[in-house]
Each structure stands twice: as C-alpha cells, then as structure tokens.
Image (cartoon, rainbow, N blue to C red):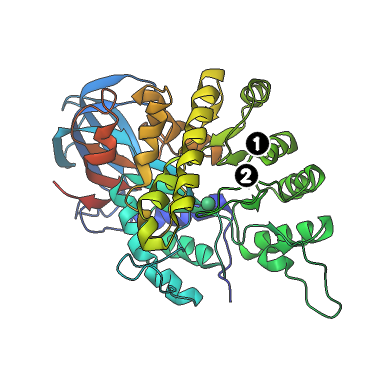
Amino acid sequence: MTTPTLPRLAGALVLASLLAMPRQGRAQVVSAAATPPVTALRFGAMADPSGRTTKNVTILVQADTVLRVGTGTAMIPKGATVVDLRRYTAIPGLIDVHTHMTFVRDKATPLASGPRSRDSVIAAAATNLRRTLETGVTTVRDLGASNYADIGLRDAVNSGAMIGPRMFVAGYGLSKLTTPAVAGQPSLAARGRVRDTMEIKEAIRAQVDAGADWIKMYGSTGTYANVTGVQTFTDVEMRVAVETAHRLKRPIAIHSYGDSGGRAALHAGAESVEHPAGFDDATLAVWAKRGTMYVPTIDHNRFYAENAALLGYSRDQVAGLDSFRLLNLDTARRAHAAGVRFAMGSDAVYWMFGENTRELGWFVNAGMTPAQALATATTNGALLLGQPTKLGRIAAGYYADIVAVEGDPLADIAVILERVRWVMKGGAVVVDKR
Ligand SMILES: [Zn+2]
C-alpha cells in the first residue's frame, strides 16, 4: 500500500507542472500559449548567505522557479503581478535537515499517546508542516518515521494534497537489536531493527524499495531525555551500511550522541553526522578535511529541558540534558573554529515545530556570524541534500523559495528566529502574516 516514488528529477517535473497551474495568490491570467504568468516580488533588500546585502531588489518568479533577480522596476515585464514587500528583507527558503514530522503529540495532553495508524499520523502531522513553514523553513530532511508515514507525507506535499515544506525522507531508521534471534520469529529488518551486516543490507534495501530518499542509522544510544552516547553499531557495521546505501544511490545520516560513534560514522563515510559532542581536535581536523556535514542539534535538548514537566522527565534527566547541551555547544564552537561544515537541524518533534530555526542562535553563540549561520540553513543544507543548484539561494533557475523577514538578518540572527512575515515555496505563497 505504499505510493510508488518517482525518481527525483521526474518528481521535480511533476511538481513544476502542478505549480504551473493557476492557484491562489498568483497571477490569474493564463495566456493561450500557456506561458505561466510572471510575478514580480519587490523587496527592500535581499540578504545572501555569502554575507552580501542588495537593496531595492526585484525577484521575478514564474511557476515554481526564480526567473531573474535584479534591482529597481525597469526589469518588471508588462502584465506581471507586482507584490510589494519593500518593508522586508528577502532570504532564501530555509532548510532544516533533521526533523521528525510524524512525531505528533498535543501539548495539552503530552503524555497521551498520539495517533497510530499511517493515515491518522499523516493527517495530524499537517500542524507540524504548517508550523515549520511559518519559521521560513521550506525544505526538510525528515530522519526516521514508522509505517512510512514520512513517505506518505512527502508525496502528499508534492502532489499538492497537503501544504508543507518539500521533504526528503528516510523511512525507518536502523537501530541495533542486541537480543539474539529466536528461531521461527520473522526478521524485523524491514522495520529497521537489525542484528548483523546481512540484516543491515536487508533493512536498507527495504527503505529504498519503500521510497526513502535517505538512510538513517542510529549509531549510538541517546534520545529524548537519554543523553548516553554509547556506540551501538560497530565500525564495520557502519561501513557496510554506508556502502550499501551508496550502492543503492542513497546518502546516509548517522546518529551518535557520543564521540566514538560519531568518529566511526565519519570514517565510514556518512554524508552527515547527527548530534555528537565531545571530539578531540585531531578528529575535528579530519572532519574538516573530509567535508562531512555536522548537524549538532543543540537546541532540541533545550526543548526537552524546558518541557521536562510536561514530558515527565526527572530533575536528574534535566541536569543531564543541560550538561549535554553545554558539551554540544562547546564541540560546535571548536568544530566551527576547525573549519567543519555545519547544516542546521532542529531534531524537532511534538510541539517543537515552530522553533525549528532556534538552532541558528546557538550557532552564532558558537562563533558564527549571522551570515555563516544563515548559510548552514541554506547553501549548506542544499549541498547536503544534493540540490546546490535548486535550493538554498535566490537566483535564476532556483526554486522560488523565498522568505520575507522584518529587519536585517545579517546584523541580528533573531530577525530570522522571530520576524518571519511571509513565505513563498515553489512560487506559491504559503505564509502571509503581513
Ligand atoms: Zn532525530
């Protein structure tokens, strides 16, 4: 009952043709020649992740794509719909490379279990999608879900049935089973629960067959209030996972709270390493040289600590979360100084959606300029997703993913965290709080 997945390029073409149809908030006239109408967005300024600000910018959008970027009004073609956003600064649609959209819980009843079936999870996740768009995030990499609800969500967004960020999804994350296999019991590999290298290969193949864009592996303990970082998969098993994923043309993200799992993930050749803290300088130097993306997810432990009462965490657990967060921040500071590449990942679950970009505040805290922090959520995210010519910039040929913020985000990162006023994704206005 899984929806067949189109190859990425075909998916993009389907998306483009869907977005080319007239829809709300876009020019109404469709010419006989079926050339999609042009919309001209006029901004007071445009802030680039390279650190440059351009004043009085006009962005021409056609269908889901940026046609041209320039200044002033002379470039606006006759008949274009003009949208006046001159009070605002344009930044590229943001990319959150670590979410769990299908982890749905209501803040009013936090300890009640959420929806269970694939369809009810997908329906309930609509709130997470919307709150994420409201932060200016127009693309996510979703790292782990049950029952392929993430694949259903991605396809619903791509078809236009649901409104949300474009999603790159992983299906079931691979976790290590330490109990011995019992004769006669079926393998759990298709659901990501594996014992050995044979089952690792089987699990990865199953995710790819189901339509996953990415592979996720839990390379250490540590999740929610548990911040232990004990490596679970061996170095060899991680290497097999990376090789299998790559043979099937899928990149792989490896989760590790601890440094040994993180180091193993790095040496195995994962595209990104999620969460880890506590590396020595020699490892950071290797890391910088390899160019592997570091996704520290510092802020999610702030979320858990702040919501400890609602989530039923003990005082000791909160102390553990706080000390891990400090170690995480210190590692990020040293990694940034060593030249390691970062991507912004929130690790958002539950009602943390809507706070996806708070991670950028920690990045500035770790020594980045606001422009460098913006790059982690734009150009670096796009690079990690293999979309450096489609996502992460406002330029001709890129998706028209554009966020209007009030203020100068290159002077103060809080402008991105707190003052998103309008969001366009793929040429369609998805948030308007002007
Ligand atoms: Zn996660």
Q: Quadrant for residue 286, please give it.
A: top right
| Residue at the farthest right position | 183
Q: Residue at x 68, y 63 (%)?
A: 192
Residue 220 visible in the current orientation? yes
Give the camera-side residue of 30 and 388: 388
Amino acid at circle 2: Ser
Q: Residues under labels 2 and 1: Cα distance?
A: 7 Å
Q: Is mark 2 within 8 Å of ligand 1?
A: no
Query: Residue 419's mark?
Result: none
Q: Quadrant for residue 70, please give it.
A: top left
Amino acid at circle 1: Asp
Which SS class for mark 2?
loop
Residue 65 location in percent, x, y?
Answer: 36, 42
How many labels sit on residues? Answer: 2
Q: Is residue 180 left or right of residue 410?
A: right
Q: Quadrant of the N terminus?
A: bottom right
Residue 66 location in percent, x, y?
Answer: 34, 38
10 Å crowding of disc 2: few (<14), some (14-19), many (20+): many
Q: Residue at x 36, y 55 (%)?
A: 307
Residue 417 location in percent, x, y?
Answer: 28, 39
Kindly identify which residue carries mark 1.
Answer: 259
Give the camera-side residue of 412 and 61: 412
Q: Quadrant for residue 322, please give it.
A: top left
Q: Is residue 405 left or right of residue 5?
A: left
Q: Are marks 2 and 1 in contact (CB under 8 Å)?
A: yes
Query: Residue 256's mark?
Result: 2
Which SS class for mark 1?
helix
